Image: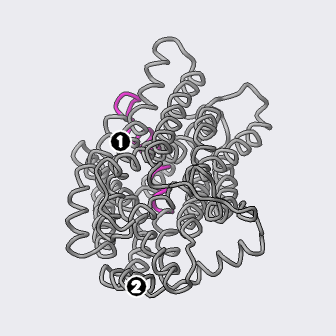
Amino acid sequence: MNGKLSVREKLGYGTASVGDSIAYSAIGTYLMFFLTTVAGVDPAVSGVISAIGAVWNALINPIWGFLSDQVRTKMGKRRPMMLLFSIPSGICIFLLFTDLNIPMSIKPLYYGFILMLYWTCYTGFFVPYMALGSEYTSDYEDRTVLRLYASMFNILGNVVTMVLPTFMVGVLEKRGMSTGAAWSSTGLFLGTCAAVTFLVTVIASKQKDPPVLASSDARPKLNIVELFREYISVAGLKPMKYLIIASTLGLICYSLLLADLLYFLTYNLGLTSEETPLILLVRPLFAAAMIPVTAFIVKKIDKRGALVFFYGLGAAILLFVRVVGVSGTGMLIVFIIGSATCTSFYWQLMPSIYYDVCEYDLLETGKDRRGAIVSFQGLIESIAAGIGSVILGVILKAAGFDSTLDVQTETAKLWIFNCTTLVPIVFLVLMILAVYKYPLTRERHAEIVRRLREKSKAE
């Protein structure tokens, strides 16, 4: 766990982040748009569907985190759950983007149920996957690099998700396929990609998740009282308090920007299905180009300082865009870069910050609760996504957005623009304040690791 990781190990772990990005970004970017413009669901109702899915995800996250810490099998601790939920996750993506010929009154119930099933499977993979990353190494720099490798694969998945869906739908429509069938085929492709990359990491991480001999009483047991006791204890850790606040605010911003982006490009700028993927491609390319910059800044000022820097920069760019407006290709690229700055760096840095809390918890409590700790990120992610979707849905409804119209009113377009600039800025500023108060610096973490090693030798 303390040795330096090889490139092969980093690549093997990072591969699943392609599927993670496809699965998460497809839902965050396209589901609400699909529900309102293809399935015909009311915008406010679509927001509620997303919120219900988020609430369910918030409930299931702690359960998977709690059980993940208890798994003891010949396949290891984390990989059994990862294997179990890999293929079902892909199937659910396909179902979510398939417009069934059922009564409109039933559609919200159907999509709400499938979304709950999707979050159950996705979280069942994501929580042990994240926990497995914390067990690869305890080295502050090496685990940051591990997550940057994962970020490279995440960006690859983001490229697929940003570019492919609208392009693929447009091509299939031109070949005579209905809009609904085109979206269903696209969902099938995305789901297959996600499932395959999940399985690759399950196989590649075998050496990092060795077999664990299980005693007769070592089977995972769900004790609700114990679960709540554990999570209250974890939430009470000083670093976790600030991480919970910062993650919630940052992911609400992420959810708003991601969900509203397609509305802005389609209705405010009037881009076609062929033009939109090319513009969206700027986001992942910018994020990929910034990975070595991120590594450099982290090395100079640590992860906390890097987050403050990047989110402050992103907020400033969005404010500039809101004041100047998006009137040409140059400003459009500036806007996309600002949006990417406000979203990409969370995934490059925040997971390894959660990893650092695992050693803090071990030193303070003597407990190894990696699954519980990293599942907080997924729990917060689900809550924040729901809040962001509700905020966007309510604002669009109040502004008079009508999915049956090709041209929206000026009021609707104004608030679509505000939801990609001013509204996210509010959450960004509050997040920066929370990150600044986060206490685990590089030096503090090194001291914790040193004390844990001394304690281990003494025992």
Magenta residues span: 252-275
Q: Quadrant of residue 311?
A: bottom left
Which residue is more in the foreground, 456 or 309?
Answer: 456
Quarter holding the N terminus? bottom left
Q: Estimate the x, y position of residue 345 in percent, counting from the top left.
A: 35, 60
Label 2: which residue?
439
Which residue is more in the foreground, 391 or 404?
Answer: 391
The residue located at (22%, 70%) in the rendering is 299
- N-terminal of the pair, mark 1 or mark 2, is 1
Residue 177 lies left or right of residue 438; in this view the side is: right
Residue 281 lies left or right of residue 33; in this view the side is: left
Q: Estimate the x, y position of residue 291 in percent, counting from the top left.
A: 26, 55
Q: Estimate the x, y position of residue 437 in percent, counting from the top left.
A: 40, 84
Mark 1 neighbour class, 10 Å CA radius: few under 14, some 14 to 19, many 20 or more: many
Whether 175 is drawn above or below 101: the answer is above
Whether 215 is drawn above or below 13: the answer is below
In terms of secondary structure, what is the magenta stretch mainly?
helix
Whether 180 is drawn above or below 277: the answer is above
Which residue is more in the foreground, 190 or 128?
Answer: 128
Whether 174 is drawn above or below 387: the answer is above
Which residue is more in the foreground, 46 or 361?
Answer: 361
Q: Quadrant of residue 221?
A: bottom right
Is 310 inside the magenta-drawn segment?
no
- The amino acid beneath tag 2 is Pro
Asked which secondary structure carries label 1, the reply is helix
Label 1: which residue?
156
- The amino acid beneath tag 1 is Leu
Asked which secondary structure carries label 2, the reply is loop
Is 272 inside the magenta-drawn segment?
yes
